Image (spheres, rainbow, N blue to C red):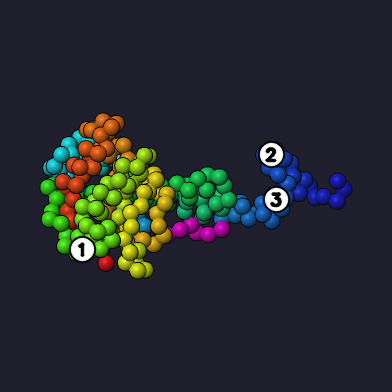
Amino acid sequence: MTNITRRSALQSMAIAGTGLAVGVTASAQDAATKPATAGMKVPAYSAAVYKLDDLVGLNKDLLEQHYKLYTGYVNNTNKANAALSEMLAAGKADSAEFNEYRRRLGFEYNGMRLHEYYFGCMKSGGSPVDAKLKKAVGDVWGSWEAWMTDFVRTGMMRGVGWSILYQDPMNGALSHHWIGDHEYFHPAGFSPILVMDVWEHAFLLQFGAGGRKAYVDAFFKNVDWSIVGKRLK
Ligand SMILES: [Fe+2]
């Protein structure tokens, strides 16, 4: 005991008091309490506006509540970015709270952006099928109908998430993916082409717990294929 300083003894006591394992040095302790950076410069996101009050087969209450959920993701993305920036600037980045915000950011951000792909391709009554898209999916699945069946099959998988037609920008390949929650199983770097929400909040209020297929049918009555086709490269 005679070789340790009063400062290191106090630090050891503090560490012991938190139940942490040994091995935290004085320099690490100091670094954790000093502002490491000025934080981050991050953009503030704003909710997009969509005309959703006259979609075919999807009632207004359902869509109003769904849109409200979307705005929550926008707000929570901004809050998470602000909290991360503040904690980084305050030297609190080595904390469980910071890690949780960082983990949460992917959920909130994808919740925001996927809803924008989804609402952004809907208009009352939809539009005629885009010829370029029809040919592209026909080249992969054999026909428009076979492609549609496989896309809907993906959307009927158990669980909450999204059915997405993606394009690989590296070679132009098209593929279907099931996205769990908002952030799981995205193929890295792929571009979303058609995005369909199959969380229960997307249909439960109008169609009931077993109404996913009826909701999917209604969704396809309102797809603006001209917008979907423009996403294809
Ligand atoms: Fe949703």
Q: Amino acid at mark 3?
A: Val
Q: Secondary structure at mark 3?
A: loop
Residue 216 figure quarter: top left
Residue 164 forms part of the magenta stretch = no
Which residue position holds label 1? 135
Which residue position holds label 2? 19
* Mark 1–mark 3 distance (CA, rounded to whole Å): 61 Å
* Label 3 lies in ligand 1 vicinity (Cβ under 8 Å): no
Contact (Cβ within 8 Å) of mark 1 with mark 2: no
Which tag is nearer the camera, tag 1 or tag 2?
1
Residue neighbourhood size for the residue with mark 1, other residues' Cα within 10 Å, grouped as few (<14), some (14–19), many (≥20): some
Q: Nearer the viewer, residue 149 or 59?
A: 149
Magenta residues, start to end = 36-41
Residue 181 figure quarter: top left
Q: State the quadrant of the C terminus.
A: bottom left
Which residue position holds label 3? 24
Q: Please provide percent x and percent y for residue 116.
A: 27, 51
Contact (Cβ within 8 Å) of mark 3 with mark 2: no
